[in-house]
Amino acid sequence: MTLSLGYIRDALEGAIPAIMSTVGPDGVPNVAFLSQVHYVDERHVALSYQFFSKTRRNILTRPQAQLIVMHPGTAQMYRMDLRYLRTESSGPLFERMKAHLEGIASHTGMAGVFRLLGSDIYEVTALEAPPCNTLPASVQPCSPLAALRRTSEALSTCNEFGTLVDTVLDSLQAEFGVEHALLLMLDEAGERLYTVASRGYPTSGVGSEIAMGDGVIGVCAQARTAIRISWLTHAYRYSRTIRDVAVRDGLGNTLQTEIPYPGLAEPHSQLGLPIVRGTRLLGVLFVESSQDLRFTYDHEDALVTLAGHLAASMDALRELPDSMADTRFSPAMPHANAPQDGSALAPLLVRRYCGTDSIFFDDQYLIKGVAGAILWHLLREHQATGRTEFSNRELRLDPAIRLPDVVDNLEARLILLRRRLSEQAMGIGLRKSGRGRLSLEVDRALALQEVNPG
């Protein structure tokens, strides 16, 4: 069988370090280990230039090298002869390699230390598989291409944002066999991503936030490129994203507004996929696993395509006329074990901190930002008039909510709010009662309080 770089891509992952041999100007050979070899195309690979090492000095004086890589599943070795061509310090390839390195560095807070200086491009002049003892190849549990086809067909039937979110995460589990997944959307300021839905975790983490540039998710969003880490040693354990602790105006004490991030404590494989439409970043689709080498190049290719389909579907929903809407009403989400007579419960104290629109139920944090402003609008109107039916249009027109003119952002915030209310189970629920319509359900008396209204 004729070997090609595409055929041996799994051997370039770095689970087993590559071995690179160069020769100095004095004829003395040098051997170095490399963490990863980047596939460029069928004739070229790229290696990261981070330090002016002996290997690089040798290459600049004698631009030939030999590289040995090993398939992590079969232990088959591949040997290639390389010829150094050039170093790129800008462009798509450089940005992808830079983002990948930054994603790994962020695991240990080493961002800025592991800095990519350039992408060294090599031509592969020879490739062979020397005889060696090997293991049988494992059977891939599913075809990513077939899974992508079925998932795309399912997404094409979604006429509502919440259905779209659930369909993509359910399909990741059912079609791709992904056990742990998150869908995050970009906030109004373009500075943080917030979780709107998840699968496979003990807690949903809905409402948890990650700053742009933090971890695989934040770097993926910032660079707008897929980042795949197929193996994590102890040095690369995922460090929790540090959340902001807000100090409210004039309180003199600190209020915790952190929703715990639901990710695996010790992931071994991660893949972050930006959801981009044109020049707009909408969010990030993120999958992870406790297994090494869970996501291959084929998974990355398929899921990058899926993220593109998801972005297009989100954008299409913005222009969907009411006549094409999904007419199925969302069932009421369970929100309390309240008695039939809500008056038997003490009034629920709902506090709004005006500076950030943070909402607390008694002393328990619920939500902040746009979602908090939306809930405050609904509860205030309900208490004043008894209303329970509302429209998306009035939310967009309310200047107090400060909603940007992006329809899918509103839909994402409403999903987030519905699910947070359901999880807290404090006697308040929200459901979609038709396209552009909301139904508020309140099972107990409320006491609304604004803190520092200005």
Image (cartoon, rainbow, N blue to C red):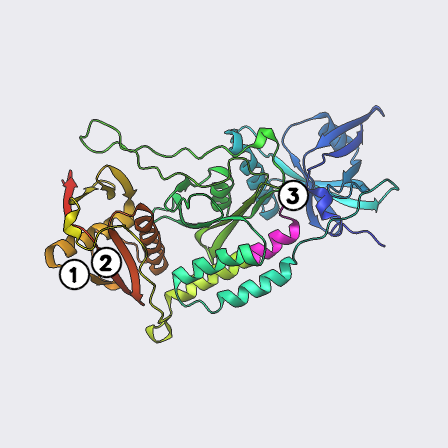
Is 382 placed above or below 325 here?
above
Give the residue drawn at x 19%, y 30%: 251
* Local secondary structure at mark 2: strand
Q: Is residue 183 left or right of residue 437?
A: right
Q: CA distance from mark 3 to mark 1?
A: 53 Å
Residue extent of the magenta highlight: 294-305
Depth check: give the residue in front, 395 or 276: 395
Label 1 or label 2, whichever comes before in sequence order: 1
Which amino acid type is marked by label 2? Leu
- Mark 3 crowdedness (10 Å alpha carbons): few <14, some 14-19, many ≥20: many
Let me know if residue 399 appears in the view. no
Tell me if residue 295 is in the magenta stretch.
Answer: yes
* Local secondary structure at mark 3: loop
Q: Is residue 252 left or right of residue 154?
A: left
Which amino acid type is marked by label 3? Leu
User: What residue would you read off at disc 2?
Assistant: 440
